[in-house]
Amino acid sequence: MSKEMQELQKQWHSVVQSIYSNSNVVAFMNSRVGQYLDDHPFVALSLLMFTAVSAIPVAFFLIFVVTTAVMACIGVIVMEGVAIAVGGIALLCVLCGLGALSVGVSGALSVCYIVLSTLVNYWHASRSQIRKQELNGNLPQNSPPVLDLSASNGKNE
């Protein structure tokens, strides 16, 4: 097993020597970046791993870009028509939703207005009736008077 390991080590050493003897590698290793990476092997390994792992997503993205460009050149009119149709349908859905929302909100606000105006009219009518009783010399009753809202139709007396 020791001879096999020595043989493997010799082959690995020859591969590394062929890489280091390449003129592009020598020029890179003499640069500032190469010297920095040679002094910081963890950074070099991290950079190498990032480059290797990111190659597949970058390739898929480039394939997507090329495919999209070809599709755009071939079917601009068809794709534009589909995009406008989808956009129009989406706009219609949004506008219908906004219409339903506005009807609901206006209904809720109308109910609030009716309830509040009825309460204010009831409060004003009971206060004016208490004042009339005070002016006539009668004592006010302990319980507030019952107001028939259907007879007054919201008019103040």
Image (cartoon, rainbow, N blue to C red):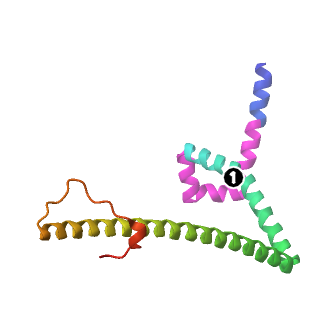
Q: Residue at x 34, y 63 (%)?
A: 147
**Is residue 153 found left or right of 40 in the rendered image?**
left
Task: Give residue 68's position: percent from left, percent from top.
Answer: 80, 69
Viewer-proximal residue among 94 and 155: 155
Residue under pointer 1: 54
| SS type, badge 1 | helix
Q: Main secondary structure of the magenta part?
A: helix
**Is residue 92 found left or right of 112 in the rendered image?**
right
Magenta extent: 12-40
Q: Is residue 30 magenta?
A: yes
Viewer-proximal residue among 59 and 37: 59
Task: Give residue 21's position: percent from left, percent from top.
Answer: 72, 51
Q: Residue at x 43, y 66 (%)?
A: 112
Task: Give residue 146's position: percent from left, percent from top.
Answer: 32, 60
Q: Residue furthest top?
A: 1
| Three-letter amino acid code at the position of disc 1 | Ser
Q: Is residue 126 magenta?
A: no
Viewer-proximal residue among 90 and 6: 90
Report which quarter residue 150 is drawn in: bottom left
